Amino acid sequence: MSGFLKAVAVCLGLGLSPAAASAQTPVQFGLGGGASIPTGTTSNGLKTGWHGLALVQFKPAASPVGFQIDGSYSQLGFDGGGGKDQIIAGTANVVYEFATSAESQFHPYLIGGGGVYNVKAAPDFGASVSDTKFGINVGAGFNFRSSGMGFFVEGRFHDIMVSGSDFHYIPITAGVRFGG
């Protein structure tokens, strides 16, 4: 038997199913998506769009504080058509989960941090213009846990410090978390 097959057999023999393995680690992975809503002066030229999110979160079991790194892609169409703004973001965040009863599957949290944002104006005709800047975000959400898997809904306010004026938008995200 090859070394790989022996390792698989040992893992199966120890009962290390994905649910059992996730119970042993404070790391969660997640995917989500939803609507991205421009706010403030950003809403003057853009309409509501969509986004996708991938995340990795580390939260020790005994602590209400965790850390999350996420990457997202958002698209907001120009008012009247003719193109779109694309936002690629990578952020590092602190997450504070409020204490709830041990039986509760509903867990509210606050999230906030900073990161790097690339905003690209992509008209249907003509050259695209791109700008990469620092930005911050803050928001709140709810985790719903059920049998080794979790679901979440959150809203965050993003402030990107682009040339001229800040770029603001609020992604409303629904997603799933695995692990932890």
Image (cartoon, rainbow, N blue to C red):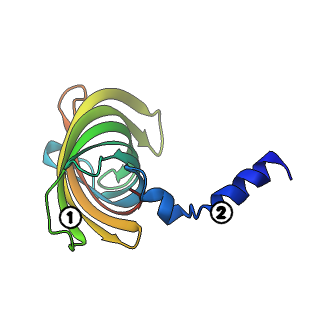
Circle 2 packing at 10 Å, graded few (<14), some (14-19), many (20+), is: few
Tally of numbered discs? 2
Amino acid type, residue under disc 2 in the picture: Leu
Residue 159 seen: no
Query: Which quadrant, please, contains the C terminus?
Result: bottom left
Q: Which mark is residue 12?
A: 2
Name the residue at 19% across, 27% down.
164
Question: Residue 10 location, x and y as percent?
Answer: 68, 56
Tell whether 60 sits left or right of 4. left
Instruction: Report the amino acid beneath label 1.
Output: His
Q: Residue at x 26, y 44 (%)?
A: 66
User: Relative to 97, does residue 118 appear above or below in the rendering?
Assistant: above
Residue identifier under label 1: 107
4 and 28: which one is in front?
A: 4
Please tell me whether mark 2 sits on a helix, a strand or a loop. Answer: helix
- Residue placed most toward the observer, 5 or 72: 5
Occupied quadrant, residue 31: bottom left
Q: Residues within 10 Å of mark 1 (few under 14, many from 20)?
A: some
